[in-house]
């Protein structure tokens, strides 16, 4: 109750300076000791111009700043993203992830999340994948440009050939 009163104080100098101060005061009001928060080495995963039909790999770590080990789980929202391990069992876990772009269309954007869940905390890591233009699409665009260039040249060659034949 005291934490809420301080947060709603009319005088700005009487309010909390940071969210962490407010959180600590709320925990004290609730009669709980301050629990250490998990440290995650990343806050998001972004893959720009990812190749279609490939596997993208990376890793991050989740660490407990306290002396105890972490108990929890890690899971993605959609199946095109895999993580290993999927359980937290030590003080620090190195988590590998794989993004499967096999069924993703060229020039598309896909979003997912990785959730790190313990008894005390939930961390959501956003994942965004942008697929690069497909190779065949590039070839088609190049072919169309080439045809637009060759057709006038062929017409010019035919006209010049006819002109030469008629002049002989």
Image (cartoon, rainbow, N blue to C red):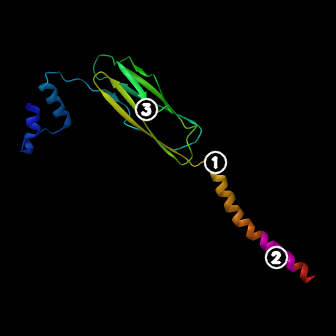
Q: Residue at x 33, y 31 (%)?
A: 123
Mark 3 secondary-structure assignment: loop
Alpha carbons under labels 3 and 2: distance apart: 63 Å
Give whichever of discs 1 and 3 has the lower sequence position: 3
Mark 2 secondary-structure assignment: helix
Q: Residue at x 18, y 31 (%)?
A: 23
Mark 3 or mark 2, which is nearer to you? Answer: 3
Picture coordinates of residue 141 (x, y %)?
64, 57
Q: Is residue 31 left or right of residue 49?
A: left
In reply to whether residue 50 is colored magenta, the answer given is no
Please name the residue that numbered disc 3 is placed on: 77
Q: Residues within 10 Å of mark 2 (few under 14, many from 20)?
A: few
Mark 1 secondary-structure assignment: helix
Picture coordinates of residue 143 (x, y %)?
69, 58
Alpha carbons under labels 1 and 3: distance apart: 29 Å
Asked which quadrant contains residue 35, the reply is top left
- The secondary structure that most of the magenta stretch takes on is helix
Residues at marks 1 and 2 touching, judged by CB atoms closer than 8 Å: no
Q: Is residue 164 left or right of residue 75?
A: right
Q: Nearer the viewer, residue 61 or 101?
A: 101
Picture coordinates of residue 113 (x, y %)?
41, 35
Alpha carbons under labels 1 and 2: distance apart: 36 Å
Q: Nearer the viewer, residue 39 or 83?
A: 83
Q: Which residues are magenta?
A: 154-163
Q: Is residue 103 left or right of residue 68?
A: right
Please name the residue that numbered disc 2 is placed on: 159
Q: Residues within 10 Å of mark 3 (few under 14, many from 20)?
A: some
- As displayed, is residue 80 above or below residue 160? above
Please name the residue that numbered disc 1 is placed on: 135
Picture coordinates of residue 11 (x, y %)?
6, 44
Q: Residue at x 38, y 34 (%)?
A: 125
């Amino acid at each position: 109750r005291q934490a809420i009163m301080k947060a709603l104080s009319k005088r700005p100098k009487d309010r909390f300076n940071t969210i962490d101060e407010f959180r600590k005061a709320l925990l004290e009001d609730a009669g709980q000791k301050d629990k250490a928060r998990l440290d995650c080495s990343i806050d998001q995963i972004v893959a720009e111009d990812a190749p279609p039909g490939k596997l993208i790999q990376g890793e991050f770590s989740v660490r407990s700043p306290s002396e105890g080990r972490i108990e929890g789980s890690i899971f993605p929202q959609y199946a095109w993203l895999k993580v290993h391990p999927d359980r937290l069992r030590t003080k620090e876990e190195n988590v590998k992830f794989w993004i499967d772009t096999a069924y993703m269309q060229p020039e598309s954007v896909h979003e997912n999340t990785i959730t790190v869940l313990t008894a005390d905390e939930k961390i959501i890591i956003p994942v965004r994948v942008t697929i690069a233009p497909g190779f065949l699409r590039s070839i088609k665009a190049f072919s169309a440009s080439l045809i637009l260039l060759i057709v006038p040249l062929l017409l010019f060659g035919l006209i010049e050939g006819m002109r030469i034949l008629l002049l002989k």
